[in-house]
């Protein structure tokens, strides 16, 4: 890398397109009436037998309180911190997060949930529409407050009560007014009892998002999470945890196929979709396969209104995020779909994230960019590290 490239790279304000705030223990109990709904409001309970804190709502265990707080932890997954008091405060406290971003060479972060589910669908089945909305609104309000530490650098993406489109659209307007730059949408709404993404049922939601210029973000794991038990116990815990996430990464191929094949992209040409935490290397094959089958199945005879090939629809309005990829997979994506539809992320602070620590071989983001991505050159990096995300989320 030349001295000029180093200078240019240092000047790029990197936008991290996928990070998570570890929810503080009082997020819901401080914002939703426990007098009205009792222990159905998510709260933390200590499991003395396991020695960990658990998120609980009614008779359901939602997960471990610090399961996603992996960055910098001393043990590899599936081992995780027992509680938040033993992790770096940057995982859950805004001012500490900003300081860590400075150390990592990150200007801005796009923020996603954990407890509500990666597609915000975990509250879809609480059995009370009023409570479900209250829980979603409490999270959205929390994220608004959390991001207020620096609204230019901490970018909230709202959780969506997609199970009721009328309610969802009202909440979209409310959150957009508070500064949220996009919506989270489950890539498997049928898993929660709603129609699939290609169904015209969703057209009013897409139209509202397009009119409000809110991106629609499909985070992996936002639907069916059954892949967690991919391997038998005899394969070993580490091998299982190394294997099942891959099935989540590529599951967004179904999302891309549904959006394009179902005509969603055609009907809403100004709407931007983001495939979050899915990687980009697989996009080359998926789009080539879609283009091939488009012709083999004579799609345009059935739908003469479709005026673009799948790859062209993708280039117009869909984006993919990568973090650890470099070399052949990333190069293939750049060669086939170009540098205008690819975003950089770190997945901080999850087990798969670009977060160095005692149990992780990952480089800090600024070091990964310098050591692994510098060959792409300043012009491509400017787009991938900043410009594309700035365009999607309306940032400077």
Image: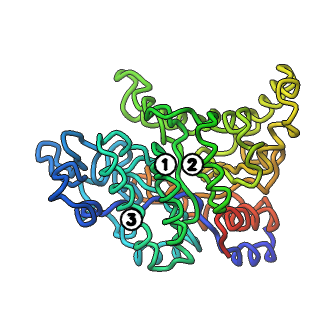
Look at 71% across and 78% down and name the residue there.
11
* Percent coordinates x, y for residue 52 in the rendering: 20, 50
Q: Which mark is residue 234?
A: none
Q: Which mark is residue 352?
A: 1
The secondary element bearing badge 1 is classed as: loop
Q: Identify residue for label 2.
A: 277
Position of 214 compared to 83: left or right? right
Give the position of the C terminus as an image quadrant: bottom right
Q: Identify residue for label 3.
A: 91
Circle 3/circle 1 CB separation < 8 Å = no
- Disc 1 to disc 2, C-alpha distance: 10 Å
Look at 60% across and 44% down and name the residue there.
278
Can residue 239 be seen at all in this image of the molecule?
Answer: no
* Percent coordinates x, y for residue 9 in the rendering: 72, 72
Position of 117 compared to 50: left or right? right
Give the position of the N terminus as an image quadrant: bottom right
């Amino acid at each position: 890398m030349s001295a000029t490239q180093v200078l240019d790279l240092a000047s790029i304000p990197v936008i991290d397109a996928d990070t998570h705030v570890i929810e503080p223990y009082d997020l819901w109990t401080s914002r939703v009436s426990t007098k009205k709904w009792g222990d159905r409001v998510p709260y933390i309970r200590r499991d003395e037998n396991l020695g960990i804190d658990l998120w609980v709502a009614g008779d359901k265990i939602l997960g471990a309180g610090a399961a996603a707080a992996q960055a910098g932890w001393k043990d590899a997954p599936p081992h995780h911190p027992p509680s938040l008091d033993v992790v770096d405060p940057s995982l859950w406290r805004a001012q500490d997060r900003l300081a860590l971003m400075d150390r990592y060479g990150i200007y801005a972060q796009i923020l996603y949930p954990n407890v509500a589910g990666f597609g915000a669908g975990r509250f879809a089945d609480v059995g009370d529409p009023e409570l479900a909305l209250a829980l979603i609104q409490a999270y959205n309000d929390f994220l608004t407050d959390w991001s207020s530490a620096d609204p230019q650098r901490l970018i909230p993406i709202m959780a969506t009560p997609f199970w009721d489109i009328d309610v969802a659209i009202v909440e979209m307007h409310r959150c957009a007014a508070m500064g949220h730059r996009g919506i989270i949408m489950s890539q498997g709404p049928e898993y929660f009892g709603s129609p699939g993404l290609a169904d015209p049922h969703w057209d009013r939601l897409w139209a509202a998002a397009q009119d409000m210029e809110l991106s629609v973000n499909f985070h992996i794991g936002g639907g069916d999470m059954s892949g967690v038990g991919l391997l038998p116990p005899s394969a070993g815990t580490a091998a299982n945890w190394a294997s099942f996430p891959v099935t989540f990464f590529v599951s967004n191929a179904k999302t891309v196929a549904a959006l394009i094949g179902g005509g969603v992209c055609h009907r809403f040409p100004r709407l931007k979709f983001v495939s979050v935490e899915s990687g980009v290397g697989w996009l080359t094959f998926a789009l080539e396969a879609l283009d091939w089958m488009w012709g083999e199945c004579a799609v345009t005879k059935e739908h003469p209104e479709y005026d673009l090939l799948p790859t062209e629809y993708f280039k117009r309005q869909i984006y993919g995020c990568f973090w650890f990829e470099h070399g052949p997979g990333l190069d293939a994506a750049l060669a086939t779909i170009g540098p205008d539809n690819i975003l950089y992320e770190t997945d901080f602070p999850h087990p798969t994230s670009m977060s160095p620590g005692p149990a992780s071989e990952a480089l800090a983001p600024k070091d990964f960019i310098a050591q692994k991505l510098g060959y792409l050159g300043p012009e491509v990096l400017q787009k991938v590290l900043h410009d594309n995300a700035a365009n999607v989320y309306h940032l400077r």
